[in-house]
Image (spheres, grey):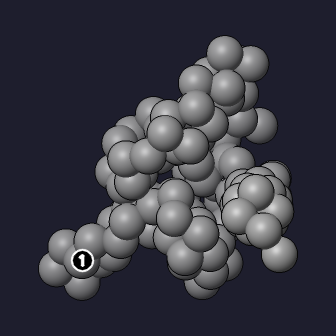
Amino acid sequence: MNIKQNKVEALAKKLLVAGDSTRLKILCIIFDDKKVCVSEIAKKLDMSVAIVSHHLQSLAKAGFLEPNREGKQICYSLLKSRFNTDLKDFICRNKLNNISKL
């Protein structure tokens, strides 16, 4: 596999992670709030903490988010990267930033 093909494969994996509708909703919440704890996201999406936590871990593993422990809670914030900035711009430009309210 050459370097370009590796980059394409990595991009495809990242888009696959972000392309899940629940994960898009989570990203939109974090785009709006900058840093959010698992329980807050679960409440906003009317989902269980366990399911939200699973999605957040997938997003963190893929390089979208950074987890931070605050007491007993885990909160997540967006990692600074060109890809994340472009994704946020795309979502906001397409008026998906209120997707969490759907």
Vertical placement of 25 versus 88: above or below?
A: below
Residue closest to the eye, 74 or 15: 15
Q: Is residue 99 left or right of residue 68?
A: right
Please tell me in which quadrant of the rendered image residue 39 appears: bottom left
Q: Is residue 36 left or right of residue 14?
A: left
Q: Which residue is mark 1?
A: 69
For the point 66% across and 41% down, the residue is 100
**Label 1 crowd bin: few (<14), some (14–19), many (20+), radius 10 Å:** few
Q: Is residue 20 left or right of residue 99?
A: right
Residue 9 location (% of width, % of height):
80, 65
Q: Amino acid at mark 1?
A: Arg
For the point 37% across and 65% down, the residue is 66
For the point 59% across and 69% down, the residue is 62
Vertical placement of 31 versus 12: above or below?
A: above
Image quarter of the C terminus: top right
Disc 1 is placed on an element classified as strand
For the point 49% across and 39% down, the residue is 82
Residue 18 location (% of width, % of height):
72, 55
Residue 78 appears in view = yes
Residue 101 appears in view = no
Residue 87 location (% of width, % of height):
62, 36
Vertical placement of 9 versus 88: above or below?
A: below
